[in-house]
Amino acid sequence: MRRRTRLTLALAAAGTLAAGSPAVASSAEAGGSSAGEAVVMAKLQPFSAAAAKAVGERNDLVLRTTIPEIGWAAYTAPGTAAAASAALLRDPAVWRTHHVRPGERPPRDLIPNDTIFTQQGQVVAGQLTASWNWHWTITNFPAAWDLARGENQRVAVIDSEFDTEHIELKPKLLQGKNFDSGTTRYRTTSVRANAEDIAAQTLHGTHVAGLVAAVSDNANGVPGACFDCVVVPYKVSLRGGAPGTPQASESKWVADVAEALVDVSNRSDVRVVSMSLGTDRNNAPMRDAVNLALSKGKILVASTGNSQQNNPGVQNYPASYPGVIGVGATQPDDNIAPFSTNGDFVDISAPGHGILSTWDSTIPANAPASIAPTHGVGFTNLSGTSMATPIVSGLVALMLQLRPDLSAAEVQGILEASAVDLGAPGKDPVFGAGRIDAVKTLQNTAAFVRPGPAPDTRKAVRFFWSCTQGSRNLPAGKAFRTVPVRAKLVCKGRTQPALRKVVLEVQRYAARGGWKKIGTLRTTNTGRFGFTRRLSTVGNWRIRLAYAGDAALKPSGSLGIKARAIPRR
């Protein structure tokens, strides 16, 4: 769910954000120099030894070494590291670079060199004006990126369209799936916007995907919450375009989303599913698809809706389903965004009012105001819980990098426990548990210790019993007694407390497998019992009684009767 904010302010740096524009270096690097040779590292995608060598030859650099396990190559540069880094970033085989200037000390937080961190710019959020990177700084993502950067993590995004040729997304979008039913590309791998999407003005997914995982630290554009992770794009129809434009029916939209969710559920390589979409109707097919995904261990993150001003408190699905993390939207002053829907289905909040991210690069600057880019072709400012949701989804992927063993409930618990409590104390229907704090969330993720099972405070059952064989008594808990094979044991006893008319198991111990059931009996109204057992084979017989337990009494086993059956003389 999203709202659009059209900027009237022209930014001096907007041109550097245009897709396909040259990479932008910081002013400090542009004027820097170093004596002798410099070392620059480059991450190649895809990586190969031949590609690393070719990159060096194309850029007049000497290949020093490669680290194929992580896809990096190190080069010696004859001039400054900054100049070599800028040249490498223009090479199509290079995803990102790394170098440290002479005398530079590593910073406490990773500050990426994307344009919104190296240049000044603004976004408008209603009556507020904020720095164009406010959504990353207020949530402490730079410090969080020192702890995790999403390597080898994948986030499925179910949304309207994805610009697979965008300079900030092309290396980060895996092969997608199209579940926009009734279109010519249905069930293909094409997920780009079609003419119907543009006519309906439901462009949305490219912006969301950029907030999850735009190419980060590449001296251009914007970073993504999950930094180095990738997106699995799922295209569906999307409702909510401009008035008068053609819109998908509710039933078609539900079918599309349900089919996409089922497909994600059957994947073993994706756990996080981001859904910036919703409806106020509790549709059975969607509910079943959500339950299937949750049963497969997926972590579902969904927007809580933007209806607070015209339909306050209305539930939004799938965010309102149990087990789904529902995300509200905050604004730069840490107040809730006025449109963010309130309700007990709001679990957590994140920045969502005045958010700059990627935009379909085929949309020109002179397009209709509702879809025209605001910060140069390929980038725009939007508002909505749809913008908050992918930021949370990206953070969840960072959590799973540190702790892939976490369950969906544990992830939600850590997110909520780590949030900055805003509004009423504790979890409330406006902010949920509060606004996310990325670094605190990752610190708590790394420190998380799964609590052990609660101690069983139920009482144990005691058994007072013995057996007889002829005139001989075999009390429970004593040493083995020798008896002839095929002898009949007559056993009786009582329980304390008195178990009235309950079933007890008669068990025999086996060297392989432990205690095994060999019969059952039912106690009397006074908790007494009796049974007989013929020792049909030669060997050791260890027999006991066992009670399965109930709400007040824990599972309990008696001491055993021990008899050694020997051949008859």
Image: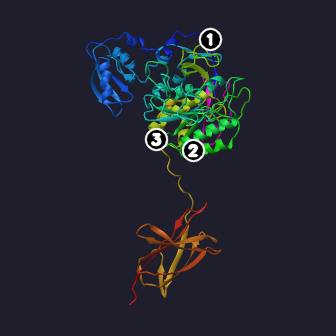
Which residue in the protein does label 1 denote? 8
On the image, numbered disc 3 is attached to which residue?
A: 404
Q: Badge 2: few (under 14), some or many (20 or more) residues near its Cα, within 10 Å?
A: some
Q: Quadrant of the C terminus?
A: bottom left
The disc placed on residue 294 is 2
Q: Which region shows up in magenta?
A: 317-344
Mark 1 secondary-structure assignment: loop
The disc labelled 1 sits on which kind of residue? Answer: Thr
Q: CA distance from mark 1 to mark 3?
A: 44 Å
Which element carries disc 2, helix, strand or loop? helix
Earlier sequence position, callout 1 versus callout 2: 1
Q: Nearer the viewer, residue 165 or 36?
A: 165
Which residue type does callout 2 highlight?
Leu
N-terminal label among 1 and 3: 1
Report the colour scheme.
rainbow
Q: How many marks?
A: 3
The percent position of residue 145, horizontal first and vertical second, equals 45, 28
In the image, farthest residue toward the bottom: 569
Q: In this rendering, which labeled residue sits more in front, label 2 or label 3?
A: 2
Q: CA distance from mark 2 to mark 3?
A: 16 Å
Structural distance between the alpha carbons of marks 1 and 2: 43 Å
Contact check, label 1 and label 2, Cβ < 8 Å: no
Q: Find the residue positioned furthest to the left.
A: 36
- Badge 3 amino acid: Pro
Whether residue 215 is in magenta: the answer is: no
Left or right: residue 368 versus residue 134 is: right
Q: Look at discs 1 and 3 and give the one toward the viewer.
A: 1
Q: Residues within 10 Å of mark 1 (few under 14, many from 20)?
A: few
Give percent across and percent down for residue 126: 65, 18
